[in-house]
Image (spheres, rainbow, N blue to C red):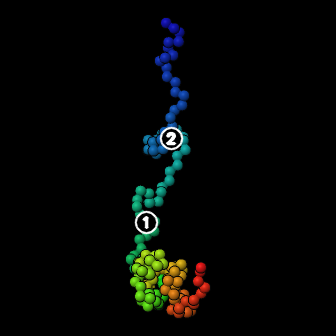
Amino acid sequence: MASGGDDWDTVTYLRKKPQSHSALKTDRAINQARRAGGEVETSKKFGAGGNKQHSAAKNTSTLDAESEELRHETVDRNLGLIIQKARNDKGITQKELATKINEKPQIVNEYEQGKAIPNQQIIAKLERALGVKLRGKEKGQPLPAGPKKK
């Protein structure tokens, strides 16, 4: 036989596959690392594994009080009445006014009820469509007839 026949039976590992992170976290792996003198770091995480709030639960009266303070500023009720009066004077419905200013009818409804969050662009559109001032000291007065665009 050839002199190199014994080489076929030996297996040589060039590099060993490192352990996965989950395998390193087992009790067995931790104890083995301690025995070998390896570095082991343990830390407890706050609220780990739970679906808990970081702060203590607040009572409902506190939450109600906070929600009252955190409301959005809405348009003045007088503005809503001015819009409604001007719209009725022109004889158009909320839907027709909304179509005229390219907004949803719900937007016009919210402005008339005083529930809308003020948006200066929408108020400007309403002013032009209705021909009435909706901002400033002269609320409710007709808009001055300015030069028309050609």
Disc 1 crowd, CA 10 A, few/some/many (<14, 14-19, 20+):
few
Is 42 above or below relative to 103? above
Q: Which residue is mark 1?
A: 53
Front-most of residues 77 and 145 = 145
Is 91 above or below relative to 11? below
Q: Quadrant of the C terminus?
A: bottom right
Q: Residue furthest top?
A: 1
Q: Residue at x 54, y 87 (%)?
A: 135
Q: What amino acid is found at the position of numbered circle 1 in the picture?
A: Gln
Q: Residue furthest left?
A: 60
Q: Answer whether residue 62 is visible to the viewer in this image.
A: no
Disc 2 crowd, CA 10 A, few/some/many (<14, 14-19, 20+):
some
Q: Residue at x 44, y 57 (%)?
A: 48
Can you give x and y, in whole percent of width and height, for residue 146 in the image?
Answer: 59, 87
Q: Residue at x 54, y 28 (%)?
A: 14
Can you give x and y, in whole percent of width and height, for residue 67 in the image?
Answer: 44, 78
Q: Answer whether residue 91 is visible to the viewer in this image.
A: yes
- Frontmost of labels 2 and 1 is 1
Is 73 above or below relative to 28? below
Instruction: Name which quarter of the figure residue 50 lies in.
Output: bottom left
Residue 33: image tag: 2
- Label 1 secondary element: loop
Instruction: Name which quarter of the figure residue 62 lies in.
Output: bottom left
Can you give x and y, in whole percent of width and height, for residue 102 in the image?
Answer: 47, 75
Front-most of residues 149 and 85 = 149
Q: Earlier in the sequence, mark 2 or mark 1?
A: 2
